Amino acid sequence: PLQKEQVRGRLLDIISREGLTATDDGVEAMLRLSGGDMRKVLNVLQATSMSHPVIDATSVYTCTGEPLPEDLDAIMRSLMDASFNVGYQTCQQLMRTKGIALNDIVTYVAKITAATKLPP
């Protein structure tokens, strides 16, 4: 994978040359989703620019079908700070209303949990 700054530089150059409008959070979303894969970031840019006049984080996540970070954060907060039932209900509600896949929830929770330093 390429470094984030390598992808960012080329992505901003392409956005400028194509006369597209992208917000900072839109660029960050594309970078986050690409994982350093320049082909993927270009595909996301093309798809998002064809379906939205402004490339912002919401349009990027909507276009790619990825869950919004704030929805995943809400799930994580409910799982960590509330009872099991509340956490479960939050997951169920977002799966029903936002179409978030259980696999996306489990992947995100596992990633965050693995990176969290817990007291001994």
Image: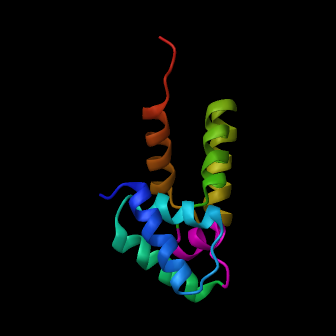
Q: Is residue 105 left or right of residue 37?
A: right
Image position, residue 99 (x, y; %): 59, 67
Q: How is the image coloured?
A: rainbow
Region of the chain picked out in magenta, as a range: 53-65
Quadrant location, the N terminus: bottom left
72 or 23: nearer the viewer: 23
Q: Is residue 38 above or below residue 50?
A: above
Look at 49% across and 38% down and name the residue there.
112
45 or 113: nearer the viewer: 45
7 or 111: nearer the viewer: 7
Look at 66% across and 38% down and name the residue there.
77
Q: Quadrant of residue 85?
A: top right
Image position, residue 28 (x, y; %): 55, 60
Asked if residue 36 is among those painted magenta in the image, a careful observer would answer: no
Image position, residue 39 (x, y; %): 34, 74
Asked if residue 61 is among those painted magenta in the image, a careful observer would answer: yes
Q: Is residue 4 above or below residue 82?
A: below
Label count reads 0
Q: Is residue 49 above or below residue 4?
A: below
Judged from this view, the residue extending furthest toward the top is 120
Q: Is residue 101 left or right of residue 56?
A: left
Look at 64% across and 79% down and name the residue there.
21
Q: Is residue 93 left or right of residue 43?
A: right
Image position, residue 35 (x, y; %): 39, 58
Look at 44% across and 42% down and name the residue there.
111
Q: Main secondary structure of the magenta part?
A: helix
